[in-house]
Each structure stands twice: as structure tokens, then as C-alpha cells.
Image (tube, rainbow, N blue to C red):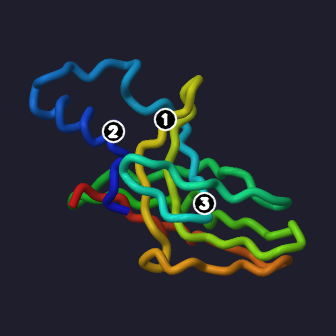
């Protein structure tokens, strides 16, 4: 996942180039949550979050960045999984990382399987293994 949501990208650029001061109100509010989307998100547009029995956004912990990337979920957290109990298949295309602010902010987005939708049949499981998401700036 190398894609920042557009407001996050602009803010990070401005903060690291000295055009704004990073303030507590603008930094992400932990914990962070992983959302699965049924369509492809983009920098300017959030994806449509999966709905149905067995799905809810999942808290995700990341390892400290090293070598320009951070991975999650951590090995201590373990895999994150969802079991589709909705009776119809889920289509999983994208992933987004949101914070827990009073009005949650979307910070990162990416595509599973290069944007080719993944079908998760009813009663099947979708799982993200520990270290299965890598977030980097390049």
C-alpha cells in the first residue's frame, strides 16, 4: 500500500516541507482501523466499505517503520480475518486505513490483487496474515 489519501498526502508534504506545523489535531488518532472495500478506492475518493454479516472494520497495529516501510498487522496481533455470514458473496477489491478521530480520517488506501476483485463466498473467510500489509512512501 503506497497510496495516501489526497488530504493526507497534501498535509504530509506541507508538514515535511515546512509550509504547515504538524499539530496534534491533524495527526492520526489511534487506534487505526482496516476497512475492506468492494470497489477500488483512489486518492480523492474512499471505496465502498463491505457490508454484511461477519464484517466490521478491524483494529490494526503496525510495526515501526524500517527501511522506508511499516508492516501490519504485527505478529503479536496476529492475522485479521472475517467470515462471510451474509448469505451472498462479498467482492473485496480495496483496503483503507482509517483513524479513530471523532470524525474518522482515511489516511491510506490500496488494492488487493492489483485491483482484480476477490470473491469471498458465503461461509468463506478473508484473512490478512501478520505482516500482510506493507505501507511505504514509494
Asked whether the residues under the numbered discs 3 and 2 touch, taking CB atoms below 8 Å apart as contact, a structural biologist would say: no
Say which of 93 and 80 sits in front.
93
Which quadrant does the N terminus fall into?
bottom left
**Distance between the Cα atoms at labels 2 and 1?**
9 Å
Which structural element holds mark 3? strand
Q: Which residue is mark 2?
A: 8
Q: Which residue is mark 3?
A: 36
Q: Looking at the picture, how far across and down is residue 40, in whole percent?
A: 49, 64
Q: Which residue is mark 1?
A: 105
Asked whether the residues under the numbered discs 2 and 1 touch, taking CB atoms below 8 Å apart as contact, a structural biologist would say: yes
Choose the circle earlier in sequence order: 2 or 1. 2
Q: Looking at the picture, how far across and down is residue 43, in whole percent?
A: 36, 51
**Distance between the Cα atoms at labels 1 and 3?**
15 Å
Q: Neighbour class for label 1 at 10 Å: few (<14), some, many (≥20)?
A: some
**Distance between the Cα atoms at labels 3 and 2?**
19 Å
Q: Is residue 121 above or below residue 93?
A: below
Q: Looking at the picture, how far across and down is residue 66, in whole percent?
A: 26, 57
- Please tell me which residue is depicted at 27% across the width and 42% down the height of the picture: 9
Choose the circle earlier in sequence order: 3 or 2. 2
Q: Quadrant of residue 3?
A: bottom left
Asked whether the residues under the numbered discs 1 and 3 touch, taking CB atoms below 8 Å apart as contact, a structural biologist would say: no
Tag count: 3
Which structural element holds mark 1? loop
Which quadrant does the C terminus fall into?
bottom left
Q: Neighbour class for label 3 at 10 Å: few (<14), some, many (≥20)?
A: many
Q: Is residue 111 above or below residue 56?
A: below
- Please tell me which residue is depicted at 87% across the width and 68% down the height of the picture: 85
Choose the circle earlier in sequence order: 1 or 3. 3
Amino acid at each position: 500500500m503506497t497510496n495516501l489519501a489526497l488530504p493526507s498526502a497534501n498535509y504530509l508534504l506541507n508538514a515535511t516541507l515546512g509550509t504547515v506545523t504538524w499539530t496534534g489535531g491533524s495527526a492520526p488518532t489511534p487506534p487505526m482501523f482496516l476497512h475492506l472495500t468492494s470497489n477500488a478506492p483512489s486518492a480523492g475518493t474512499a471505496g465502498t466499505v463491505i457490508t454484511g454479516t461477519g464484517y466490521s472494520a478491524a483494529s490494526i497495529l503496525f510495526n515501526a517503520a524500517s527501511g522506508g516501510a511499516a508492516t501490519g498487522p504485527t505478529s503479536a496481533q496476529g492475522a485479521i480475518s472475517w467470515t462471510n455470514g451474509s448469505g451472498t458473496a462479498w467482492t473485496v477489491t480495496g483496503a483503507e486505513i482509517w483513524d479513530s478521530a471523532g470524525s474518522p480520517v482515511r489516511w491510506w488506501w490500496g488494492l488487493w490483487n492489483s485491483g482484480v476483485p476477490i470473491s469471498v463466498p458465503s461461509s468463506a473467510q478473508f484473512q490478512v496474515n501478520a505482516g500482510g500489509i506493507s505501507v511505504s512512501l514509494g
